[in-house]
Image (cartoon, grey):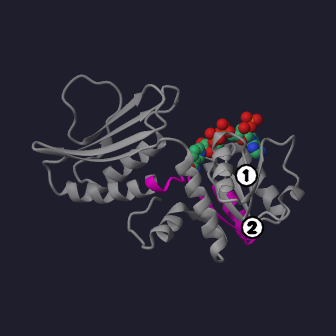
Amino acid sequence: MRGIVLGDGPMGLAVASALRERDEEVVVLGRPATTHPPGTFAGADVVFEFSRGTAVLPNVAAGLAGGCRSFVMGTTAWGVNQAEIGALLTQHGASAVVAANFSPGVNMLGRLVTSASRMFGALPAYDPYLVEWHRRGKADRPSGTALELGRRILDGHPAKRRLADGPRDGPPDPDELEVASVRAGASPGMHLVGFDAPGETVELRLTARDRSAYAMGAVAAADWLLRSPRRPGLHPFDCVVDDLIGIEIPGGAR
Ligand SMILES: NC(=O)c1ccc[n+]([C@@H]2O[C@H](COP(=O)([O-])OP(=O)(O)OC[C@H]3O[C@@H](n4cnc5c(N)ncnc54)[C@H](OP(=O)(O)O)[C@@H]3O)[C@@H](O)[C@H]2O)c1
């Protein structure tokens, strides 16, 4: 595989490192003076997009002009351009896997949380809750992954209708899902979904150590794109994970 990684931040470098570990050819490019010249993409099998939201559309347009037809798109916060980018890819007969989180573990945790919420939702004694812990410097709370897990619990659990938010004085509202965000130290990310009953606690926990799981998923997405012809347009990461685990599991991320 010859890969071009657009984005020279920690995530682009993690993808490049995963490719180099497999002895793949890879070039990492940072912000260009204007746009990336089409010639940059000559001979590239896959473009990995891990830059900035505003750069996604010009970067994909440049890759298409340069002849690339397979894209792995992990940059976040570019949702407004999704339809436009999907149409552009389709016009050019190109395919992309797009995900705000390429960790296979996070994808599978989401599916487990959907199933667990449905199962424990039938047992009123088990009260669900969500905890996430990230480094002190992380700006947003709850994390995007925690919001996605919360949405899955609300979808699957009949007793919970909304996330608890903000300070309050008084007993918790039983309709609300308790969500706790911790911002301390250097944790790259911990998400925990629990179901607590008087006699026991069941917990599903994912602890990230570094960016390598995202990079592993991005490289798996590239393999999936190159393995056989894919329908032009945008594909969710679920397709890749289904393929990795060899079965289609209901409740994949939307
Ligand atoms: N999908 C996933 O699994 C996953 C996981 C982690 C992170 N992410 C996302 O991936 C993106 C990159 O993450 P990061 O932590 O590496 O971010 P980052 O530290 O902001 O790095 C992005 C880099 O891209 C450069 N850049 C800007 N415009 C560019 C262009 N047109 N072409 C190529 N490079 C360009 C930036 O340069 P300047 O500083 O000059 O702008 C910066 O060096 C973010 O959107 C992040 O949220 C996705």
Displayed-image quarter of ligand 1: top right
Q: Nearer the viewer, mark 2 or mark 1?
A: 1
Q: Which residue is mark 1?
A: 5
- Residue 69's label in the rendered image is 2
Left or right of residue 215: residue 25: right
Does any portion of residue 245 appear in the rendered image?
Answer: yes
Left or right of residue 23: residue 158: left
| Amino acid tagged 2 | Arg
Identify the residue at image location x=74%, y=49%: 6
CB of residue at label 2: within 8 Å of ligand 1? no
| Amino acid tagged 1 | Val
Viewport quadrant of the N terminus = bottom right
Q: Residues within 10 Å of mark 2 (few under 14, many from 20)?
A: many
- Is disc 2 placed on a helix, strand or loop? loop
CB of residue at label 1: within 8 Å of ligand 1? no
Q: Residue furthest top?
A: 169
User: Which span is picked out in magenta?
Assistant: 82-105
Residue 237 image point, x, y percent: 53, 61
